[in-house]
Amino acid sequence: MDPQARAKAVLGADPAALTALLADLTSPANEARSRAEQQFHALRGSHPDALALSLAQLLLSPAHPSAPIAAVLLRRLIAPSSQSFVYPALSPASQSSLRALLLSAASSPALHRSVSKKLSDTVAELASYLLPSNAWPDLLTFLYKSIASPASPPTLLESALNILARLASHLAAGFPNLHTLLLTALSHPSSADVRVAGLNAAISIIQSLPSAADRDQFQDLLPAMMRALAESLNCGNEGSAQEALEMMIELAGAEPRFLRRQLPDVVASMLQIAEASGLEDGTRHLAVEFVVTLAEARDRAPGMMRKLPRYVGRLFAVLMTMLLDVHDEPAWHAAMLEEEDAGETGSYVFAQECLDRLAIAVGGNTILPVAAELLPSFFSSEEWKRRHAALMTIAQIAEGSAKVMIKNLEQVVGMVLNSFQDPHPRVRWAAINAIGQLSTDLGPEVQNHLHHVVLPALASAMDDFQNPRVHAAAATLNFSENCRPDILRPYLDVIVGKLLSLLQTGSQMVQEAALTALASAADSSQEHFQKYYDAVMPYIKAILMNSTDKSNRMLRAKSMECISLVGMAVGKEKFKDDAKQVMEVLMALQGSQMEADDPITSYMLQAWARLCKCLGQDFLPYMSVVMPPLLQSAQLKPDVSVTSAGPEDENAESDDEGVETITLGDKRIGIRTSLLEEKATACNMLCCYAEELSEGFFPWIDQVTTTLVPLLKFYFHEEVRKAAAVSAMPELLRSAKLAIEKNQAHGRGTSFLKQLSDYIVPALVEAMHKEPEPQICTIILESLNKSIQLSGELFEESHVRSIVEGIKEVIVASTNRRIERTERAKAEDYDSEEEELVREENEQEDEILDQVGDCLGTLVKTFKTHFLPFFEDLSMYLTPMLGKDKTAEEKRIAICIFDDVAEHCREAAVRYYDAYFPFLLEACTNENPDVRQAAVYGIGICAEFGGSAFRSHTGESLSQLYNVIKHPNALDLENAMAYDNAVSALGKICHFLRDSIDASQVIPAWLSCLPIKNDLIEAKLVHEQLCVMLEKSETELLGQNNQYLPKIVSVFAEFDALSRKAMFEKKASSLTAKCLARGGVMMITLW
């Protein structure tokens, strides 16, 4: 049959052919389904009008078996976000008919709920396209009549409410009697589904309203919303209740303050659901999720949940009870890899995650008192599950409670260590696991203060051979990660000996754990591990060479990790002979065909990089083997799937543990995280090679640059951007520059460096102002600064302009974030915990501005007076940073930028003195010593280069410098740098503005402050100045009858000792010697 005839048959008056086609589209037979998909796509392209109308016609018979799939396919044809969107291509007549058919189908009294939801989504999709241009007025009439009419059947009412919910942003402002209609729906006398649809519509409307005042008009709906949820539960309809809970969670995350006035009642209701053991786990989990989401909504409602400690305590108790849902499976005790999670239930895993989130959200001051009430009874229980739950709880809340928990370190660690002797193996395992978590979250305090009790306990646990799972955990423990070599060293004999024993006699899981622990011990102890190298390396090498079976892949991968970390620890000379053998094995593996899920791939990438760090330039011969697969991994495309998140796809989430799924609007996005992690690792390794090999990396610069630069905007994975692409940029420039300077660039010269810089720097600038994460923005600025230092002299004016424009955007964004936090601080629930979090976030802003200052300082040093037009443009962004309401760090950074301009632009910068100098004088009295240091340094620079323009500021400058110098605590360590710079500035006034001061008073005052000893750069300059003045035999310096000469000789003697200690260059030492000799002659003459 030709295509036209086939189309005519499928889209004709008899729906049988279309029904058959739709059935084939859902066929489990691949061939039939593929053939049907091709035919459907062909019809969409050749007969869109007939196809859309035929699908709509099927919806007029809601009992038709093809109606549900027809609704889904029609939705894809008329959804603006769909790749199959054909509505604009339909004729006006077809568009009109289609709209009428949809409303007619939605009005059908026989509409089944399974079709109703899909049809509602279809109508809403089309309406979202038409309503902005008011192109579907009939829909508004239909919705109002359906919702307002007491005669509307429940299915129609539910459908209309669901459409209203989807279109809330378009309809909320003008929909008549909206409040009354929602209240009526929420109180529907017979249908739980209508009440839940009313809840959905109410929440969507509330979220769409622009202001808190508008939202507050719907406050009185909240009791009815909670009743709708309760009634679903009371009538045993947990499916509807779970829908309602999911909607409430959405409200809690988006508009938590809407719940503020009735928060105790709402939270109490949710906890009642969570505590109801007779309900399904899924229902209870959603109730818990609601409360945890509220606790986490700190941007919109800071501290709100902390005001309800009683409810936090109830939630905590629920979560600890859920941790009891764990079983003592025999498979767990065998320590077999495939049974790693044996006995763990969904509730157990969910409770762990929620305890972690809750502690982070409310902080240690709230969570630890609650824990202190519950934990003792759990620890003292005769039931192993309760003791086990107590230990798991401590492990989960440690991260969020770290600052408070550290204050009771011995007590917390003591409770856990007591359980090392517990009679039940799973409890002992939980204790070891908890120590591991505490070592990470409370490190290095645990290691520094409690190593004498923790390490012997761990070593003893490795002897638990009857329970391999327990000593596997002991071996895995990375206590040593935050451990200083001097702390670890006394325990190494025992620890390494036990780990070697486990390597020889343990199960595979135990061996893997032992390898991890050995690697960590080597990494932490560094050269102290040389003592054990000869005993350890043969065993690890044997595992690498002999673990060839597929079941041993992770064991072999761990051996690579261990060998490379041991090699780095002991150094090249000790490791080099074994390194050759190891690299031969790695090269053979690299050339073999490995399966996609083989962990060896990722471990090998990291092992190669560590071997490179260990061997340095000796690694170059292996680069031709290493680089091709490494580049291949760095170039991996993200495995992203986008599917509909509509009701018909509610069970479509992947069961694949390697796929992370998020829902955005009506789309469900699945991302294979394992690929992203491999990509991030590869990018990290490329950066490592460039850094380690320097000019030796030059042959790969072209390929690596074109691979990494686009990844500056790789928003799927932070690590790819942060530690890889961003950090690598200056390393690539440095490699190229060194290769050119050392004639190792294969004939390429400065023009290549410029070409490389012209590619990298604009990409960094673009990434800088598009970067959503402040922490990564800081790293980008740091890399940009290094790049300017390396290639700034090759920049064109347009590059400088783009950098300055980008920096302006960064300053504005940072300022706006600070303003948002200031607004948050006005919230009624704002408390000390939230204040601490805001302080930490503002410290991140300070780091951003610090890097901004460094970047601008480098530009000033590079371009000097040519940068002044850009500085003039920037001033309107910098001077507000000097306002009285700004932080000390903001002020310091703005002053430092001006200091750089004054120092490197000299006389040309004088025109900015009037704008900035008053801020410098004011900052001399700032309580922050770093601000004072920047201010007095700037005064000294202006005195040196300002000439006559500075004269009018001399008197006030002297006064402020004296204030800094004579401060009661001026010589305290924290104030010492400000003191030294003030003394240096005073000396510059003495030297450059002698005729503007009373030299007979000021110079002796300056001399009395010498020597300065903390800022060694200023110390050198000051004492060189003293040398020059002494050589000129200046009267004001020597005083009447050379009265100050002994002081001068004393200063030089002290400075000579300081200069020898600090290894100053010969010029300073020779000047000192000369001046000391001069002083000695004068003293003899005087005597």
Image: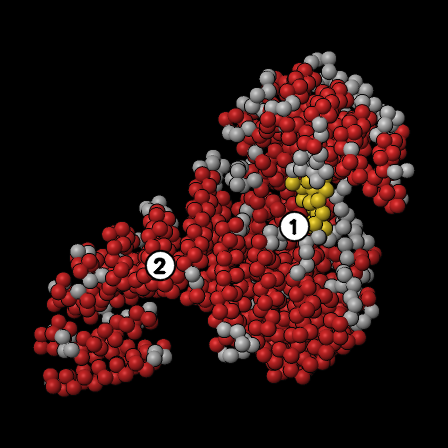
In the foreground, 869 or 315:
869
Quadrant containing the C terminus in the rendered view = bottom left
- Residue 867 disc label: 2
Q: Position of residue 204 (x, y in %)?
A: 62, 29
- Residue 429 disc label: none
Residue type highlighted by circle 2: Phe
Horizontal side, residue 353 vs residue 1035: left or right: right
Vertical arrangement, residue 395 with respect to residue 858, above or below: above
Vertical arrangement, residue 816 with respect to residue 763, above or below: above
Structural distance between the alpha carbons of marks 2 and 1: 57 Å
Residue 669 image-quadrant placement = top right
Residue displayed at 67% across by 80% down: 579
Residue 934 at least partly seen: no
- Residue 393 disc label: 1
Q: Position of residue 331 (x, y in %)?
A: 83, 57
Quadrant containing the N terminus in the rendered view = top right
Q: Residues within 10 Å of mark 2 (few under 14, many from 20)?
A: some
Residue type highlighted by circle 1: Thr
Q: Earlier in the sequence, mark 2 or mark 1?
A: 1
Residue 458 image-quadrant placement = bottom right
Horizontal side, residue 785 vs residue 667: left or right: left
